[in-house]
Every structure is written in structure tokens, then in C-alpha cells.
Amino acid sequence: METIRSALSQAINRCLASIAVIIHLSGCGGGVEPAKLTASPAASPRDSAQEKIDQIVENGAKSPVPPQTTTFSEAEVNQLLRSRMDEIMPDGISDPHVRLVGNGVVIVRVVVDIDEYKRRRTRRSGLGPLALLTGKLPVSARGTLQTQEGQGRFRLEAAELNGIPMPPALVREMITALSRSRRNPDGYDIERPFALPANIRTVVVNPQEAVVAQ
């Protein structure tokens, strides 16, 4: 059951950022101020999000699976990302923040360690302007989440590095390079189609919320 919960958490995070495993690469066309997280004394966003994940896992294990929709607020998504940083974020990527725009559009922001990216990329040429940059810099991206019949895909549409427009292909290369490991030598492809766990059929991104349907 814990393995299913972990897979579900990662898939939701990937859907809503995607990184991916989303991986948080925010607001194209300008800086995005992080949302102010609010919490009642009874439950924090992380507590409420984890409770909803548990309910999704429990419902998805039933046969037949009862129709159920579960709504995650933008604050819950961001808090869940931060609480699971070590599980879902590759080395060299930090400080994730997600905006749920609506109509499937997700805006993400992360801080990327440019030096770590240069060290881990397989090609030693073709860096272009990146060759002059060092340190940790904000990377922003805008993409669309598409889900249907238990399958999902995140399409990256535009990106910026430190406020400068950059090819989306370079963002994909950054994520792939930084996510390579012994268990995953090819790295993570942010645009690769993926299966939704726990009998989730769709994930719909509305303004400031995401609705998971089973």
C-alpha cells in the first residue's frame, strides 16, 4: 500500500508540474510570486492533501472502482511538492512552485544548479549562452497537462532562464541530465506519456485547483 501511495504522489506531482515529475519551473512571460499558503488550525495543506491521497488509493483499490472526484487546491499541491522534495526532485533542482492556470495549463518555477547541469550532461558542446552562466538560477516553464482514460502527458510550451527566453528543448535536456541515476541511467523525460495510478481516469487543471477523477 505504501508503494502505491508513493507512486500516486509522484504521478500527481508529475501531472501538476510535471515532473514532473514536475518539477517546478514557473511563470513564463514574467516572474510569478509564490502563492501565500494558508492553513486552518485543524489541518495544514500537506495534511489535507495526504488525507486525499489516502482516500484516492483506498477508492482505487476497490473492484469495481466507485466513481469519485477529489479536488486539490494550488496550496495543497505546492505543500505536497515541498514535503516530498527528496522523493521526486532530482539533484540540482530545488525550490519548486506551481501555478494552476486552468484549461490544463500549468506554470512551474524551479531553481536549477547550472554548474551541476554542466557536470552531468553527456554532451560537452552546444551550451551556447549557458556556457557563460554559473551558480543557481531560476528556470520557468509553461505547459499543458493532457489526461484521458488513465493516461497522461505534459507538453512543455515555453521556458525562461533567469527571465531570458530559452528553447523548451533545453529545459527537457536539463531535467533529463539532472535526473540520471544508477536506477534511471536515461534520466527523466518530462514529455513522456505516463500511466495514472490507482485507477485515476483524468486529472483536470482548473484555475487554482486540480480535480482527480476515478
Image: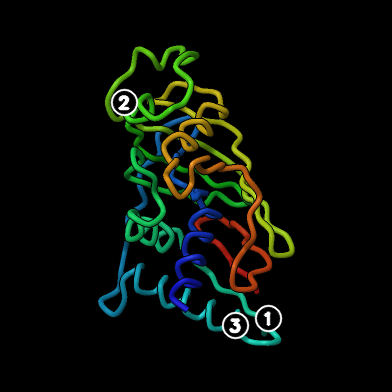
Q: Amino acid at mark 2?
A: Asp
Mark closer to the observer (2, 1): 2
Name the residue type under label 1. Answer: Pro
Residue 61 - label? 3
Residue at left offset 40%, top offset 34%: 31
Residue at image location 52% in from the left, 43% down from the top: 188
Q: Indicate the position of residue 90 as horizontal and vertical percent values.
A: 39, 45
For the residue pair 159 and 178, the one nearer the viewer reads as 178
Q: Position of residue 185 (x, y in %)?
A: 49, 41
Residue at left offset 50%, top offset 57%: 208
Q: Give whichever of discs 3 and 1 has the lower sequence position.
A: 3
Q: Judge left or right: residue 163 versus residue 157.
A: left
Callout in the foreground (3, 1): 3
Residue at image position (63%, 60%) is: 204
Amino acid on which the number 3 mark rests in the picture: Ala
Earlier-in-chain disc, 3 versus 2? 3
The Cα atoms of the two marked residues, 2 and 1, are separated by: 47 Å
- Under circle 2, the secondary element is helix
Give the labeled residue for mark 1. Answer: 67
Please tell me whether residue 212 is drawn above or below residue 124 in the rendered image. Answer: below
The answer to whether 76 appears left or right of 20 in the picture is left
Q: Is 106 left or right of 33, judged from the image as shown?
A: right
Quadrant of the image occupied by residue 84: bottom left
Q: Which residue is tagged 2?
A: 115
Farthest bottom residue in view: 63
Distance, label 3 to label 2, CA atoms, is 44 Å
Q: Position of residue 183 (x, y in %)?
A: 45, 50
Q: Indicate the secondary structure of the residue bearing disc 1.
A: loop
Query: Dot 1 surroundings within 10 Å: few (below 14), some, or many (20 or more)?
Result: few
Q: Are marks 2 and 1 in contact (CB under 8 Å)?
A: no
Residue at mark 3 to residue at mark 1: CA–CA distance = 12 Å
x, y percent for residue 128: 46, 12
